[in-house]
Image (cartoon, rainbow, N blue to C red):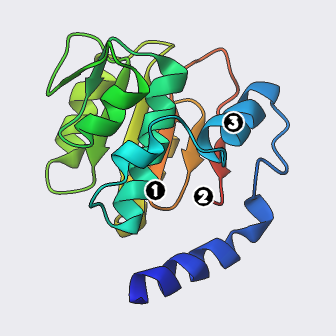
Amino acid sequence: MKDRLAYLWVWLRRIGNCRGFGIQSPADYAFVRYVVNEHWPYYQYRELAEDDDWLTQRLGRLYFRLANWRQPATVISNGYRKYWQAGCHRTQVVADASRVELAHVCVGERCRTQLEHIYNKVDDRSVLVIEGISRDRGLWQQVVADPRTGVAFDLYYCGIVMFDKKRTKQNYIINF
């Protein structure tokens, strides 16, 4: 119950950032509208919703949509395997890879080391998901300010970073 009240509080504070309002870039708007905040039920949602709590389920569905949108051959992650693979059946979920297509890290004691390792393997099509940015806002601000990163989306529970240097560097706050 306490978690649901906290979610409601965060959602109300970010109400002005719903559904891509204020985003001028057509590509960023489409990403927020049709990947991040897509509300239509996908074909796997019922099978994936087994015993997960509401936040794991919410983030898992986001990760499902990310994998479905990006269609990566590999995802660097230590969790959410069933969601990544449901979004793209050919995806291999691995602990490390020579090139980053889609990577998922959690805020914690080894996060900064993992990020440096990932930054050395990114290209213009790479996507990074950092889970738990609300617990370490300083880390998130460093990621956003880093010259190697591009467009970033702050979803409160996680952050999504893209590395395409052709696009204008921007940090969007999204009501997720």
Q: Position of residue 108 (x, y in %)?
A: 20, 57
In this rendering, would 40 be left or right of 139? right
Disc 3 crowd rating (10 Å Cα; few below 14, some 14-19, many 20+) is: some
Residue 69, image quadrant: top right
Q: Quadrant of residue 51?
A: bottom left
Total residue callouts: 3
Question: Which mark sits nearer the N-terminus, 3 or 1?
Answer: 3
Whole-angstrom CA distance, mark 2 to mark 1, is 9 Å
Q: Check whether the beta carbons of the residues at disc 3 and disc 1 lie within 8 A of each other.
A: no
The residue at the point 69 percent across, 69 percent down is: 14
Q: Position of residue 70 (x, y in %)?
A: 50, 20
- Secondary structure found at label 3: helix
The reply to whether dot 2 and dot 1 touch (C-beta < 8 Å) is: yes
Residue 89 placed where, x, y %? 34, 18
In this view, the mark in front (2 or 1): 1
Where residue 113 appears, as percent x and y from the top left, is: 18, 39
How far apart are labels 3 and 2 at the CA level? Answer: 12 Å
Q: Residue at x 56, y 29 (%)?
A: 150
Q: Amino acid at mark 1?
A: Arg
